[in-house]
Amino acid sequence: MPWKESTLMSTRLEFVSLALRTDANIASLCRRFGISRKTAYKWIERYRLASKDGLQDKSRRPHASPASSSAELEALVLELNTQYPYWGGRKLRTLLPEAVKPPHHSTVEAILRRHNREVAGVPTRAVDEAPLRFEHAAPNLLWQMDFKGHFALTDSSAGRCHPLTILDDHSRFSLCLTACANEQRSTTQDAISATFRRYGLPERITADNGSPWGSAGRRGLTRLEVWLIRLGIRIGHSRPGHPQTQGKDERFHRTLKLELLERQGFNSLAACQVAFDIWRDRYNLVRPHQALDQKPPITRYQPSGRPMPEALPAVEYPSSDIVRTVSAKGYIQYQSERYFVGEGLIAQMVALKPSDADDVLDVYFCHHLVRQIDLRERAVK
């Protein structure tokens, strides 16, 4: 089976980077990338023999030699700056060919100043040390998910683009950057499903409190949350007014805006997606990340060992639990009283379990605590 034509080089590089890990499952990766084992082993061998150059259909000459002169160094820095005008000296220094002894990042910045080059959106003063950041210890323990603010397309009849982004907390790897026509549940679920099929299931996902992943007031779980919970994924939400909970994804949005969205317009969702795919590959495979010791996110990411199931697992509870089916209006009945558990749970089964407090029952959907019922108080209908 051949490779897909879009972003061919970056797809090969992403596949080989994942396949060369000691715990890689080649067969699983082949299924996720849609290629045969014969094709997979061909590109793995070529990469081992010639690194990135081995993944090209045609060989390319190296940019420099060990005897590079100062003039050659300046030419390389200027070439990188032309290609990545929004990256600073630290990142450009990392991308210099291995044959060139890397100068201090201040030297790279001095070269840019001598040639009247500027880095868009980045101050010329030294960057302050980043504060201590919290991150999960391994990939797929937590994914951050959100919509980047929607924007108009140049063809007004084509509507607006709503970029859906999913970021791995540990590696900052961009798992999803999809140009959506809206933020409805079905559209969002389709994009998330495609991400699960390629990268597997995470342990937990965090999102904000807005639609389609959250609901306000007494509405309870949304249908999207119910779907994720049935897949065995734990759901978390940022506190209202605290966007720093989604800090890594918010930072990803600023980078996306600076490096792509502020620089060009798009006349269709298809054009958006082409540009998103190219930019995402560059972000994951090339762009040095300061929080990752100036390495790209691919160096710290590996797919989840939990594949996306073909069908949702059945909802099962221990025989000791009291099981109720949620009515068409989101209620369950217990001891002649009705209790609201959520519109997203309509037709689903929930379990009532004794809590630590006397005469108080916990209502669970799968592993998720939905609410508590205090039998000492009359239920609110």
Image: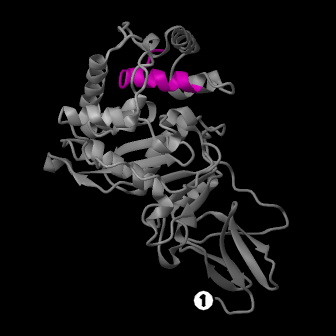
Residue at image position (28%, 35%) is 110
Mark 1: which secondary structure? loop
Q: Is residue 163 above or below residue 20?
A: below
User: Predominant secondary structure in magenta?
Assistant: helix
* Bounds of the magenta segment: 1-18
Residue 180 seen in this snapshot: no
**Residue at numbered disc 1:** 380
Q: Is residue 326 left or right of residue 270?
A: right
* Image position of 193 with respect to 296: above or below: below
Is residue 4 inside the magenta stretch? Answer: yes
Name the residue rendered at 32%, 15% in the picture: 69
Q: Is residue 300 visible?
A: yes
Q: Which color mode does the image show?
A: one colour
> In percent of the image, x 55 and y 56: which residue is there?
132
Please state the horizontal and vertical placement of residue 122, each as a whole percent of the image: 29, 47
Residue 341: x %, y % from top left: 60, 74
Name the image quarter holding the C terminus: bottom right
Q: Could you tell me the amino acid type at mark 1?
A: Val
Q: Residue at x 49, y 26 (%)?
A: 14
Q: Quadrant of residue 226?
A: bottom right
> Which x, y percent locates residue 299?
54, 32
Task: Name the residue nearer the viewer: 299 or 188.
Answer: 299
Indicate yes or no whether the magenta region holds residue 310.
no
Instruction: Count every numbered label the image shows and give the total.
Output: 1
